[in-house]
Amino acid sequence: MRLRQIRKIIDENINQINYQSKKINQTIAEISDYQKAIDAIENLSEFKFIQKEYKKLIKLENIYYNKSNSDKVRINHRTKKEFSNIIKMINQKCRTVLDLIDEAIPKQNKNSISIKLPDYKDLSRISDFFKNIDNILNQSLVNEKINGKIKLQNFDTGSQWVEVIVGSAAALNFVAGLCWAAAVIRKKHLEAEILERQVQALDIKNDALKSISSGLEKEINSLVEIEAKNLLEKEKMDYDNEYFGKIKYSIKTLGKLMFEGTEIHHSLTAPEEAKNLFPDYSKIDLINSSIKKIDSKKSE
């Protein structure tokens, strides 16, 4: 998991890790308003740094498993002290991790993107990947209309993610459009791979395989042209043949990279309207060309 994602999860939950308590008598105490703390700790339970405290919390069955609507429970002072120590330690550890992450990585720019690298094993493929990403972003975004400026921001420690500042809100929105178009091409690559495997299983001659591969490549190129034109029209951009060629290159290249495992996400600090423009990668196989939807509506 990315450090920024870890920080986001902690930040969303840490302020809920608290409770109220009062002494009832010499042996009994009452804690209240604590269920939100239990829920928040559950949200953090995947992190190893609180596993010791989490396991101790589970053993306090009359607290951890109490689902009373009143959100109150009476316990002995020993149990109350154990619970208090657990809550205190989890809070301390969370704040320490937040401080360490803030020291390790710079504050994220709202007009930046996070790019996930495919699981490459060869250095040459990693080198080609960064060349392709650089070409995609520079050819698509660095112009007067979009006013993009490409700058490396950060490598997220311990993961296959790199952060790149794109320079403007328009550039961020255009990247989202590129991702949607590329996702359509990714799906076509996936369909082509499945078809080629099926054909190979039939033990068809090489000439026939080459013919099929050539046909699939033409189909991909045709779809790239359609998606490029649709993207530029959607963004209301005037373009010449040179820029149109750059957008086609960007969509086709990014589609192949996404087929290999690349993902491009908005920054965690991006405006909500920009976040909504990016595809949901957990549902990427469901993405279809918007052109088909438009054409089908016209035919109706």
Image (cartoon, rainbow, N blue to C red):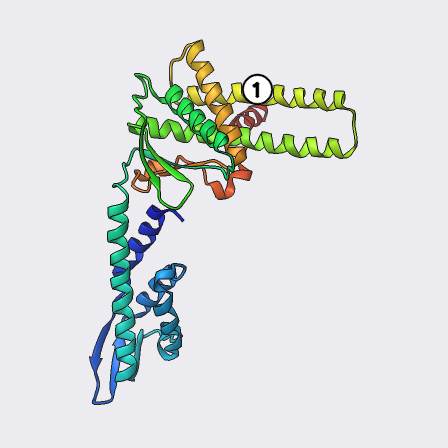
Which residue is the site of mark 1?
A: 221
Considering every residue shown, the one lying at the far front of the view is 123
Query: Which of 231 and 250 lies nearest the eye of the viewer?
Result: 250
Query: Residue 220: x, y in percent?
Result: 58, 23
Instruction: Kindly identify the residue that appears in the image at 24 percent across and 47 percent down.
Output: 103
Query: Which of 159 and 255 lies nearest the eye of the viewer?
Result: 159
Give the quadrant of the C terminus: top right
Query: Residue 142: x, y in percent?
Result: 33, 20
Instruction: Kindly identify the residue that appears in the image at 31 percent across and 23 percent down.
Output: 148
Q: In this view, does 97 lie to the left or right of 211?
A: left
Instruction: Kindly identify the residue that appears in the image at 76 percent across and 35 percent down.
Output: 201
Query: Residue 292: x, y in percent?
Result: 56, 27
Query: Residue 49: x, y in percent?
Result: 35, 61
Few, some or many residues within 10 Å of mark 1 (<14, 14–19, 20+)? some
Residue 10 in view: yes
- Give the structural element (helix, strand or loop) at label 1: helix
Amino acid residing under circle 1 = Asn
**On screen, residue 294 above or below 68:** above
**On screen, residue 118 above or below 235:** below
**On screen, residue 228 above or below 21:** above
Query: Can you tell which quarter of the image residue 40 is in?
Result: bottom left
Residue 289 in view: no
Query: Can you tell which quarter of the image residue 45 is in?
Result: bottom left
Instruction: Kindly identify the residue that appears in the image at 36 percent across and 77 percent down.
Output: 60
